[in-house]
Image: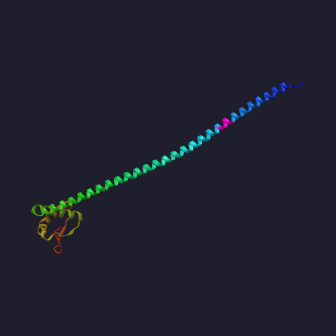
Amino acid sequence: MAMSDQDVQKQIKHMMAFIEQEANEKAEEIDAKAEEEFNIEKGRLVQQQRVKIMEYYERKEKQVELQKKIQSSNLLNQARLRILKMREDLLRDLMEDARKRLGQITTDRNQYKKLLEGLIAQGLFQLIEASVVLRCRQNDVDLVKESLPSAVRQYKEATGNDVSITIDTDNFLGNDV
């Protein structure tokens, strides 16, 4: 059985169509695989960049948070310093006022005597000694002597202990105290 030229050409066309179809299918497979690999690589690169961007913004956020803490700490310290300055000013004013009032209280003998009694008793409570040497201003010696019995009585009533007080007549306090 001999094949005619026409049959051979048909078979060649048929084979060529088959080969072309196979080539097209193979090309589509290659295109599909290339597209898939491209998408995978693109996704990996996008994810990598996303991670880098997130890390960058996390660092920026930490820096901003740190700056906020530093600023807050600075403001808090400034406020504390202002408060301390105000407290110091108030204490200075109070001390000056107390100095003036103490200077004025010495002019009223009864009030000054009462103050001395309280101060002597307070000193005795802080010392808690059986024998005490007391220093005062030279011009206050007589008033201090008058104040001693009341101060000693207060001390004895509160503690139950006796105390002996001697006024130091060799070393007096200055008049500015």
Residue at 37 percent across and 53 percent down: it is 73
In this view, 133 is above or below 45:
below
In this picture, is 100 found above or below 42? Answer: below
Judging depth in this view, the residue of 16 and 94 nearest the camera is 16
Spot occupied by residue 111 in the image (x, y as percentages of width and height): 11, 60
> What residue is shown at x 60% (from left), y 41% (from top)?
42
**Would residue 12 be visible to someone looking at this image?**
yes
- Quadrant of residue 46 within the rendered picture: top right
Percent position (x, y) of residue 18? 76, 29
Magenta span includes 171: no
Residue 156 visible in the shown view: no
Q: Is residue 120 above or below residue 20?
A: below
Query: Which corner quadrant of the image does residue 97 belong to?
Result: bottom left
Furthest toward the front, the residue is 5
The relative height of residue 109 versus residue 15 in the rendered view (above or below) is below
Q: Going by the picture, which residue comes out furthest to the bottom?
A: 170
Q: Nearer the viewer, residue 67 or 173?
A: 67
Q: Which residues are magenta?
A: 30-34
Tell me if 55 is positioned left or right of 15 in this view: left
Q: Residue at x 72, y 34 (%)?
A: 26
